[in-house]
Image: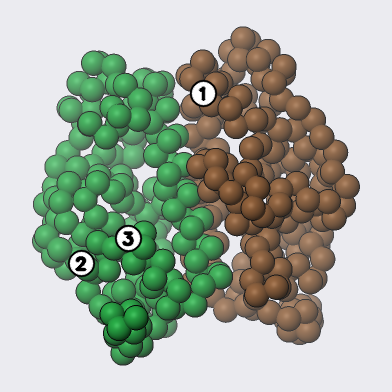
Chain colours: A green, B brown
Amino acid sequence: MKYLNSIHPLSSALEEHLRQSIKHREIHKKDLLLKAGHVCNHIYFIKKGLLRCFYWKDLIEVSAWFMKEGDICMSVESFFKQQKSFESIQAIEDCEVYYLDYKELQYIYRTYPEFNFAGRIVTETYYTLSEQRLYSLRMQKAPERYHNLMDNFPELIQRVPSKYLASYLGITEETLSRIRSKKTIS
Amino acid sequence: MKYLNSIHPLSSALEEHLRQSIKHREIHKKDLLLKAGHVCNHIYFIKKGLLRCFYWKDLIEVSAWFMKEGDICMSVESFFKQQKSFESIQAIEDCEVYYLDYKELQYIYRTYPEFNFAGRIVTETYYTLSEQRLYSLRMQKAPERYHNLMDNFPELIQRVPSKYLASYLGITEETLSRIRSKKTIS
């Protein structure tokens, strides 16, 4: 609520409505928040913990991104279009999340037009992150992408298990280990 | 105006304000709308023509995306954060665009809160496209990405010159030509 209020002041009616409609859930480490093939019906705000978004490619899991406390989490295309998701979302640590139903969120956007200001800003922020990942994937090799993560998301480098980080970078754990040791020496 | 009205009705005051503040510009084929290193100060709505967004990678241009009539066009991170752009935008055909200044757009969002509804929907739509490109880049090989374009953006396949299309797919023009001839035979 503080986060949303900081973007654009919420009216007391909207704040009350949000308090009534936002739900809370705990997810154990390794449990799925969303399974590929299902529709992402909720938008999550992470209170505690770390999650990853991943796809299946030729029977191998490919990690697409990681989300931690303070982040908003969903399968973008599945949520916005209310269609089956290609990706899954899994807790890497024990997590606590707040969440809103898709229909409830649409009701809030229609009923409290001021909420669209915050919704737009949040969407712009995550759209920018998506474009940054696209640029990085297109233009940078694995070591550069690793250093990019180090600079911009140092906490992820510490908390995300190597196998998922390697999979995000499209390399083996051994190669990741070599990149890491070079970084330490230099 | 029709497009924006179809997402969310514009008040007559807002419609009048938009009419006064939206500017019009023609761009000749091959001219740059934005040059890397400059800040993207405008958001463009393409009335006519085709543009491409591209980066430089080791002295080679890499096409990142193509935008045609009806599309909104900008350098996302540069526009939202008002910082120097890594990418350039160039007209592939003679173009006509409508555009709004960044500051003017922020003024409109603050003064006419209902415009945030349309702004949010448009941002969600382009964010989804960005995520689709990320998925395609991460998961699909060039032939699959080409067929994906064929299915979802057939007009781009017709209109975008081969050298830019090949560059977008990360392949040579010869490989693109082979993919194209296979497609015709099958």
Residue beneath the point at 71% across and 52% down: B35
What chain is tagged by disc 2? A
Per the image, the residue denoted by label 3 is: A153
- A182 to A53, vertically: above or below: below
Label annotation for residue A113: none
Distance CA(mark 3)–CA(mark 2): 10 Å
Q: Quadrant of residue B100?
A: top right
Of labels 3 and 2, earlier in sequence is 3
- Chain at tag 3: A
Residue at image mark 2? A159
Query: Distance from label 2 to label 1 (Cα)?
Result: 38 Å
Check disc 2 and give the amino acid type: Arg
How far across and down, in percent of the image, does residue A153 sit? 32, 60
Which residue position is annotated with label 1?
Answer: B109
Could you tell me residue B166's position as x and y percent? 72, 73
Work out which quarter of the rendered image holds the N terminus of chain A and state it: top left
The mark lying in front, picked from 1 and 3, is 3
Residue type at mark 3 is Phe
**Chain of the residue under label 1:** B
Q: Residues within 10 Å of mark 2 (few under 14, many from 20)?
A: some
